[in-house]
Image: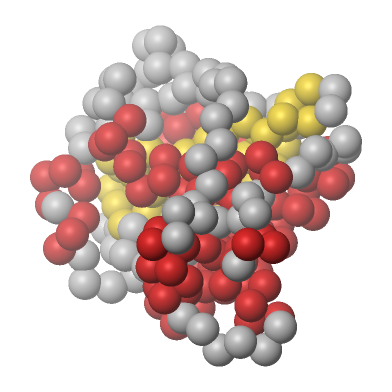
Amino acid sequence: MAEFAGYGYRRVTAQLHREGWGVNHKRVLQIMREESLLCQLQRRWVRTTNSEHGLGVYPNLLFDCGWRRLTGINQAWVADLTYIRLLTGFCYLAAILDAYSRRVVGWCLSRRIDAALALSALEQALMTRKPPPGFIHHSDRGVQYACHGYVERLERAQARISMAAKGTPRENAQAESFMRTLKHEEVYLQDYETYEQAEVGIGHFIEAVYNGCDSGMG
């Protein structure tokens, strides 16, 4: 595995599968931990959450019901935003994950970090998953998730809206964990010159590498 320096266990697993090895991603993770092969990259942080907006906020329903007690997919989703560095600027990613399977169920990349970005990821998730009434949508209190258009769309989907308390990133730990994985196993290993390069690379990582490692989870 030394030839995959900088790769996370998901990318190593995907590469080994392409080479014909039938190894489980959990076994790859175990070996990489034992051999100290997990990459530890650090990059400058850029703020993406603005919770000083005066819009309505909602209690943390995942904390109240306990996400560990989820019994199946489409009972709760978690959402987050992050920045992606380009050669001459930034673009931004919105992603929604199923809290039970941890699969990405909707995502969108944009040159702007606005409500349209978050809404595009939500529309993709709603179209592909068709969650039942009463499912939980959990996010931080950023303006993209608290704005009228996003809240109205969740209400039309009969979602129960849930938000992390201000200044408590651990209350959205699953989404934050995915964003860290994406950065360390894909973004930090690339030098995207253009938005189009970032879109292709991130799309491949999400669909073929990250979701592909747990394809049986639904």
Residue 95: percent from left, percent from top: 54, 47
> Which residue occupies 47% across, 17% down?
50
| Residue 211, horizontal then vertical, whole percent | 54, 68
User: Dividing the picture into quarters, in which one does residue 52 lie?
Assistant: top left
17 left or right, relative to 53? right
Q: Residue at x 43, y 68 (%)?
A: 31
Q: Is residue 12 above or below residue 137?
A: below
Placement of the C terminus among the 4 image quadrants: bottom left
Q: Is residue 198 above or below residue 144?
A: below
Where is 3 relative to 81, above or below?
below
Of residue 156 and residue 72, the one placed in the foreground of this image is 72
Label count reads 0
Q: Quadrant of residue 127?
A: bottom right
Q: Residue at x 65, y 54 (%)?
A: 5
Please tell me which residue is depicted at 40% across the width and 59% down the height of the picture. Answer: 33
Placement of the N terminus among the 4 image quadrants: bottom right
In front: 56, or 200? 200
Tell whether 97 sits left or right of 125: left
User: What colouring style does the render use?
Assistant: secondary structure
x and y percentages locating residue 199 in the rendered image: 77, 48
Q: Position of residue 185 (x, y in %)?
A: 60, 51
Does residue 179 appear in the picture of this structure? no
Q: Is residue 61 left or right of residue 6?
A: left
Q: Outermost residue, left direction?
A: 64
| 17 sits left or right of 36 in the view | right
- Evaluate whether residue 161 shows in this view: yes
